[in-house]
Image: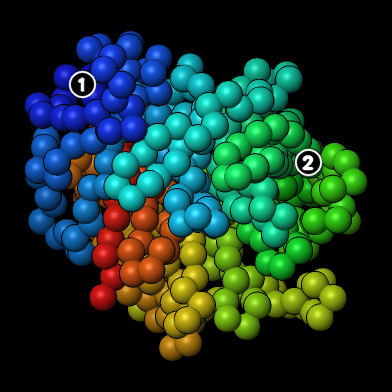
Amino acid sequence: MRTLFSLLLSSTLLASCQSGNDPKTEKEAVAQEAVVKTDADTVRTAAPEKQIGSPKLLFTLDEAHNTPDGLALAPNGNIILSVPNLADNSQPASLMEIVGETIKPFATNLPVEPSTKKAAPMDLAYGPDGNLYYAENQYENDKNFKSRLMRVQITNGRPGKIETVADGFALANAVLWKGNTLYVTDSQWDMPDNDKGSAIMRFSLAELNKGVVHLKPKTKDAHLLAFFTTTVNETGVDNGADGLDYDSKGNLYTGSFGDGTLYKVSLKADGSLAKQEALTVQGKKIPCVDGLIIDRSSDKLYLCNSRENAIEVVDLRNGNAVTTLAQNGDTDGAGGLLDQPAEVLLKGKRLYVSDFDKPEKNFVNSKSDAPHSMSVIDLP
């Protein structure tokens, strides 16, 4: 197996990991939760003929952090990154903290699900109570609704106790706070008569503070806000509702990972469902929707088209016109090229992109390989 260290010709450990005992081997680096940063020109994969845009390398991660995923903006301006390690879950999952262009451990002793003995944090978001909430995806470990919603108690910006606040999900995925209401997508919320189902679930902060919420699998649970059905194509993927955000008018948007359908979900004054609709987009057809975020000052929706190694922009105020912000062919992600982008976070005029690098059948990305990377795209 190729290792990150054999690939890197010149690298430096992040200052936050330097203490006079810098690791000399990968084993030592993994033990120290060390993270490697490289120059953008180091081990750069040749650009494909039709590359669009200019994503830049933020940093690379070692083998102990092989599937970077969820991104959350902390109150202090730092970014929390989830690393579920689903490409190689022999490595323990963790949460990392991005400070500027460096990264360091944030929470590394995540509680495992009792039966699977694994932790798998996906998307995450800070709540109005100042605590950090993350969706845990146990679907690849056990498909029998073992996924959970977790809360990290935060004190003075640092993580404390981590606890389960809801369980019974199949594939808990995106996490979104809107006021005192938390929305979570379950990409595999199947019904007895529909094994291609997915959903948006809704919880109030008050309810989550009362004790663990136990969902009722394969039902129209009271927390179910909207239900979707995935059309399975040549990828064979039936994962549905994935990324989640809301526009300047408070409408929710999600998209299907399996078939690329983009959905708008309108709410009544009491927060219940008013209407859900599949959007008709103009221009490029989007085949896959992973993580997404909306710039509410312009209502431009940025989404990860994981299947095609692309970041698409949907102009919600201009007929849902689609433009491609960045795209490249099959690479290992070196030099900042996209390597199956999974999540995006907008901070000012900079778009942060996590490269999940765990491909499905008929994806442009053909294999999971080092370096494991984070990219950034500077917007005009």
Left or right for 34, reference 329: right
Q: Which residue is mark 2?
A: 165
Name the quarter where the N terminus is drawn: top left
Q: Is residue 355 visible?
A: yes
**Tag 1–tag 2 contact (CB < 8 Å):** no
Disc 1 residue crowd, few under 14, some 14–19, many 20+, Cα 10 Å: some
- Number of the label disc, if any, that sits on residue 5: 1
Left or right for 319, reference 102: right
Foreground pick, 247 / 328? 247
What amino acid type should be assigned to the residue bearing mark 1?
A: Phe
Q: CA distance from mark 1 to mark 2?
A: 39 Å
Mark 1 or 2, nearer chain start:
1
Left or right for 144, reference 28: right
Q: Please, is residue 96 above or below residue 278 in the view?
A: above
Q: Please, is residue 32 above or below residue 380 in the view?
A: above
Q: Please, is residue 233 above or below residue 380 in the view?
A: above
* Residue 212 occupies quadrant: top right
